[in-house]
Amino acid sequence: MSVEIWTYLMIGTTFSIYIYIGWRSRVKDTRGFYVAGQGVPAIANGAATAADWMSAASFISMAGLISFMGYDGSIYLIGWTGGYVLLALLLAPYLRKFGKYTVPDFVGDRYYSRTARIVAVIAAIFVSMTYVAGQMRGVGIVFSRFLGVDITTGVIVGMAIVACFAVMGGMKGITWTQVAQYGVLILAYMIPAVALAWMITGNPVPQLAFTFSDVTERLNGLHAELGFAAYTEPFVSRSKLDVLFTTVALMVGTAGLPHIIVRFYTVKDVRAARYSAGWALLFIALLYTTAPALAAFARYNLVSTLNGKSIAEVQSLDWAAKWEKTGLMLFEDKNGDGIVQFDNDRAKNEITVSPDIIVLSTPEVAKLAPWVIALVAAGGLAAALSTASGLLLVVASAISHDIFYRLIKPTASEQQQVLVGRIMVIVAILVAGYIGVNPPGFVAQVVAFAFGLAAASFFPVILLGIFDKRTNREGAIAGMSLGLLFTLAYIVGNKFMGMPAWCFGISSEGIGTVGAILNLVVTYGVSRITPPPPEHIQHLVDNLRNPAAAIAPASAH
Amino acid sequence: MDSPKRPAHWDASKRLVLILMLVWAFVSVGCSILFVEQLNQFKIGHLPLGFWFAQQGSIVIFVALIFIFARGMDRLDRKHK
């Protein structure tokens, strides 16, 4: 069977499974719709969190980026896993104890303030919408690359699938489809990686092959011959300070992302929240420790097979010819010596490779069967759809729960709330789809926004809300607003308006760390010079810290 | 609602969190970024040690830290029941 038929078959099967799960998880009440009835087992929530977390970018682009950045690519590896330690130790158990439905719920109740709730709603929507646009685009790109349909059709198919299980099943439907999606995406990632490790080193475990074979040493040797810095050399493309700040921004941002935090509301109790964070990171680590191995193997393979060959030789490789056609790989014999070469100097470099190819081309490079290529397509879609659905629910619940129910119509019945929730999911999907089809020019750059803003807005006020009883409304509002505005202004200024990176040369990816520190200091400082929070809030905090006490009392009203 | 032993539970859990966060910072910021050049003089398998921490070791240690935390809190919950 051809790759194309396999791909249709694989995508058709996985999509049918997702829809079936969505239909099986139909919900009628708000607790089911927003937090999956709070009965998700710890391991299942771990798998769902892992799928929620690992996006099209983790699946398709990350190994490629590392492959081109060498050591400096570690910012993604440490940043996007280290944040789970913060989340597990400092936030998740206490937020589960709080037991409400959204992140703005916590901010609004803990800081007894409509203003704080509204600031949190705005931040949650902004963070999630910037992030989801990229996912929808990712769905379209996978479709177009593997099946040749145009990107718009791909985006519309993706929207329809997410709509199916998110509207019917709310958080419950999303959770159980994410569990299935994790299974698909991890298989799709591991099979080619294992095959490539076996092919290049003779050791089938990518992590062990990476550490105990001499591939990376040989790669360093090849780099030296070509005049590149060694693959393992630190701080080539970023200064040490910038690597530090970017890593911390990604860690703190990870711990502050609303669609990840709400996953911990869905488990049975505080104990399950602690363990499910561990399971989540274990499931994520499986992919995240494989990615750098894949990156090094693929880089070694590319350089050693392509460099110094004649154009005819290169084009006789099936995969090279295929990817050259898509424009993601480019060979040009600039100096006319009949062979193509990598070169550190862009003007002389004759082989151009898009980072996205590294994962997508692995099955072909390792000469795997067509069904594996189809599985990689299904895996990319699973990664994009699982993340998109989690994000869309955050956007929908911020409007239907935090704005409509908590601020506009507190008397709404369960049925009305769920109905508004379903409508908002559809609206959010339409908006996300529109941005996916007509991406603003800066879509590739907005990931910096999502992490920077989550780091600078949510993490500090939630942290202090739990660990510092004295933190009050005035402090939280001042800190959150200032952190958000500073980070937003720096990123917009630096990325789009030619502002120099005046803050110690820290890039816009790393500025979230400064925003978070600013937020922390301002929240703490302002709280100390304004009246302490009322007594019932101090009781609420005591209650959060005590895993055995009865459920936290309701907010002031 | 608050049994008298509860502050002890909170203090003990704060201590546990503090210790684990120090390990976390040492591994993520220390071994993987700040001291990476010094550690790269040593090797684990065929990889420079600092590079290995940044791309493999730190991630494995993060996973272990969360499970150690969950286990430790289980013990504290039992002790201060």
Image: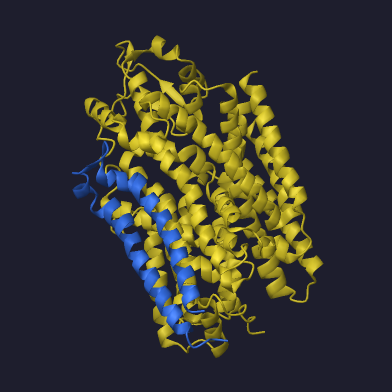
Chain colours: A yellow, B blue
Decide: is A473 above or below A264.
Answer: below
Position of residue A382 measured from the top left corner of the image (x, y, whole percent)? 61, 41
Query: For the N terminus of chain A, which image quadrant?
Result: top right
Residue drawn at 44 percent across, 50 percent down: A496
User: Which residue is nearer to you in this view: A150 or A82?
Assistant: A82
Task: Tell me if residue A38 can be seen.
Answer: yes
Residue A548 located left or right of residue A516: right
The answer to whether any part of residue A123 appears in the image is no
x 31%, y 12%: residue: A336
Quick one: which residue is furthest to the front in this view?
B79
**Residue A31, quarter of the rendered image:** bottom right
Q: Position of residue A39 (x, y in %)?
A: 66, 62
Above or below B26: residue A386: above
Residue A342 in the figure: left or right of residue A150: left
Q: Nearer the viewer, residue A379 or A257?
A: A379
Q: Nearer the viewer, residue A82 or A514?
A: A82
> Horizontal and vertical percent for residue A214?
28, 30
| Residue A72, placed above or below residue A474 | above
Among the 4 quarters of the image, the one containing residue A489? bottom left
Image location of residue A509, percent across then percent down: 40, 53
Q: Is residue A341 above or below residue A75?
A: above
Q: Quadrant of the C terminus of chain A?
A: bottom right
Q: How many marks?
A: 0
Is residue A312 found left or right of A363 in the rendered image?
A: left
- A129 and A208: which is toward the camera: A208
- The residue sitting at 57% across, 62% down in the picture is A264
